[in-house]
Image (cartoon, helix red, strand yellow):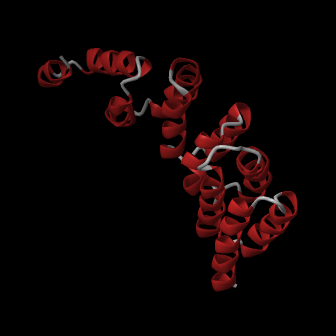
Amino acid sequence: MSNMYQELGETDELIALLRKRLLNHQTAVYQQYKQLLVERHEWQRVYPDLLKQLETKLTRYEYGDILALEQEYSKLFEQLKKYQSAPMIRNYLRQIYPAVKDKMIPLYHDVVLIPQSQKTAANAPKQLEKDLSNFLEISHDATTVQKWVDELKQRLSGQTSFLEGLEIVQTQINTVV
């Protein structure tokens, strides 16, 4: 149907159709929708209200992907803070960290690392190691990761599987420094 509107030059109908699809979780149309509005010099006017609608209509990941695409890092950080979701923070860390380093450090510590260190599942130690390694890789902040490793070593002093993972991260830190 969108091809038909495009071929007929019915831009208003196409824009309305794309907006409807976008608000119904078909986020693949976002760029086309935006481009049409940019060409008509309407994007700046439409964008603020669109973001508000997208926040209520889309899933948190769909909305987060659009915020990341638009480099709306403050808004994306607010979403991460709102949902307190370790998987969501892991998902957006690479994109958001450079823009909000100082805010991400405590959030990552409190929402990702500490809860992960308290889990008893068999994969918990490996996930904690991965979380620390990923943060180190993305941030290149060996000082912060070293502080976390020291803290976690004290917290997990009797848990061999966690300590083994922390030693692997310690080796990684030593190669960064």
Image height of 97 relative to 72, above or below: below
Q: Is residue 46 left or right of residue 133?
A: left
Q: Nearer the viewer, residue 154 or 37?
A: 154
Identified at 36% across, 37% down, the residue is 31
Identified at 66% across, 35% down, the residue is 79
Image height of 173 relative to 17, above or below: below
Q: Is residue 137 left or right of residue 167?
A: left
Q: Position of residue 41 (x, y in %)?
A: 41, 34
Which corner quadrant of the image does residue 56 belong to?
A: top right
Image height of 47 relative to 89, above or below: above
Q: Position of residue 20 (x, y in %)?
A: 38, 15
Q: Position of residue 3 (x, y in %)?
A: 15, 24
Q: Is residue 156 left or right of residue 42?
A: right
Which corner quadrant of the image does residue 170 belong to?
A: bottom right
Q: Quadrant of the N terminus?
A: top left
Identified at 39% across, 36% down, the residue is 38
Q: Is residue 3 visible?
A: yes
Identified at 66% across, 79% down, the residue is 171
